[in-house]
Structure formats: structure tokens, C-alpha cells
Amino acid sequence: MQVLRSGQHLRVYGGNLHQRQFQHIPRTIRRVVQGRTEGLCGLLAERGRANLLARDTETNNLKDNDMRTITKTYNIFLLAELSTAARETAYSEWLSTFEYSWSSDNRNTLDAFERIFNIKVTNWSYDACEYSYRFTSQYSAEEEELSGIRLLKYLVNNYWHTLFKPRTYYLKGNFKKQRKSRVLTDSSCVLTGYCADEDILKPIYHFLNSPDTDTTLYDLMDKCLDSFFKSCRDDMKYQCSEECFEESCEANRYEFLENGKMYN
């Protein structure tokens, strides 16, 4: 018995066979691969040709005349059209893959606050339920105890140009042509341009409008951080709420199967 390699032909002599007659060998040819023997089931050897499927020249895939195409029809629903149970399934599956999108922007605001004011925040965290933080002050003991009008003057002298930016005017909506006011100021998102700036600076602006003798500089820094992390927690709580999920589905026209599984 001769084992054929790729491209070789089998010649059979003897008996009543003609030298050039095609001969089918209805048996399995065995081969040795890396020390073990395997059977090539269903392979017929024939001199001069191989029993192979035709190949599609465009897709380079083998053609199978027995291949079938099956079409399946789905009923598609918007969230508002689902049953109560299906809506709960849709929300649960969305919540299992939820990722809070604003964590990096919140971190940028916190970093900017630390660079401007002499504090260092450590061991902080927040989620949709709670928040925690610690901070150390790098102000002197005398500065930490400033309050009332003295604290007001200290903030104005050291941080006025950070807390208040000249108001910008644009010429007929053209953002390339602008001018800065020499009189009017703006305190909107002055740290990074993100809304969390207003949350972390809110206690300072409140103190500048209504200074009191009970609040020291150290207390004011603590109030700023508490306001910031509280807003982060509240925002994250809303972002993963069912109300936010419904608004997102409506805005993006998400579609679902009847059982609540997302279709697109």
C-alpha cells in the first residue's frame, strides 16, 4: 500500500486492469501525524483527480449545494411598548453593564481645586449610594483660623482672579471674534469648564456674598469638598436610575424584543 502525498497519482497494475484505467479504492487511507495514526474518513482515492467540493471564486468559500437559508422574524418594541416585566428586564440588563461616564471630568475638577488651594485630598471615593474623603491642609495655623471679614479679604486678595474671569463677548455668534470685558466678570465653571467646578466652589461664592464669623478657612475647604463629593454621588445615582434609562431609550430610539432583551 502506498500513501499518496499532495499532487501524486496512484497507479495500479496486475490482474485484468488496464494500465491507464481509473480505479476507485473503497477503503480509508490512513496517515501518521506527529506520531499518531488518524483515519481520513470518506476520502476516495482515484488516479488523476480528487473528490473535492467546488470553490466560490469570489468569496473563496467552498460551495455546498445542500446549504439552506433560514429567515427568522422578530417583533420589535420601543421601551414604552413593553410589558411591565419586560421593562424591568430591559432596565436590569442595562444596569448590569452601566458605566459612569463623568468620573474623569470630576477628577479633573478635583485636581484643579487642589492645585489652586493648599490642600491635599486622600482616600476619597463615591458611588450611587455614599461618598467619603479625607484631606490635609497645607495652610499655616493662622490662615486656617481666618474667619469673617478677614477671611473675605484673604480670599479676594489671593483667589479673586481664579474665582472670577472677565466676561467674554462674541461678535454676532462668531466664536473666533471675541472681546473680554474690563468691568463685568463670570464665575461659571472657571476651573476646567465642567459643571462640577460650580459644585466645588459653591461654598466659597456663598461665603463671599454672606461672610460669617463661624466659618474658618479650614471649614470652608471642608465644605467645598463635601459639596463636590455629594454632587458626584447624586449625579451617579441619577445616571444609573430607571428615569435616566427611560430618557436614554427615548432619545436614542432603542429597540427591544418582546421579552425585554435589547435588539440593537
Image (tube, rainbow, N blue to C red):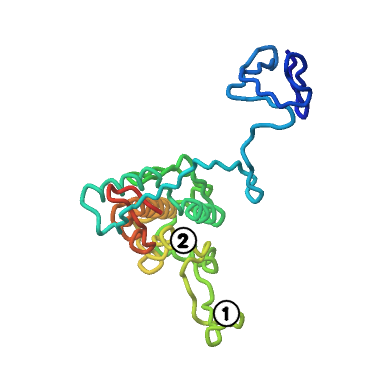
**The N terminus appears in which quarter of the rendering?**
top right
Of marks 1 and 2, which one's residue comes earlier in the chain? 1
What numbered label is drawn on residue 229?
Answer: none
Q: Nearer the viewer, residue 17 or 174?
A: 17
Q: Residue type at mark 2: give it.
A: Asp
The mark lying in front, picked from 1 and 2, is 1
Mark 1 — residue? 175
Q: Is residue 5 left or right of residue 111?
A: right
Q: Residue at the spot x=32%, y=61% of the render?
A: 247
Image vertical order of residue 20 relative to residue 173, above or below: above
Q: Position of residue 37 (x, y in %)?
A: 65, 13
Q: Position of residue 54 (x, y in %)?
A: 63, 41
Q: Position of residue 220 (x, y in %)?
A: 41, 55
- Spatial CA distance of label 1 from label 2 is 23 Å
Q: Residue at the spot x=55%, y=69% of the render?
A: 161
Q: Is residue 50 left or right of residue 230?
A: right
Disc 2 is placed on an element classified as helix
Q: Nearer the viewer, residue 166 or 129?
A: 129
Q: Nearer the viewer, residue 143 or 204?
A: 204
Q: Residue type at mark 1: give it.
A: Phe
The 10 Å Cα crowd at callout 2, few under 14, some 14 to 19, many 20 or more, is many
Q: Residue at the spot x=77%, y=29% of the render?
A: 7
Disc 1 is placed on an element classified as strand
Q: Are marks 1 and 2 in contact (CB under 8 Å)?
A: no
Residue found at the far left of this picture: 84
What numbered label is drawn on residue 197?
Answer: 2
Q: Is residue 51 left or right of residue 72?
A: right
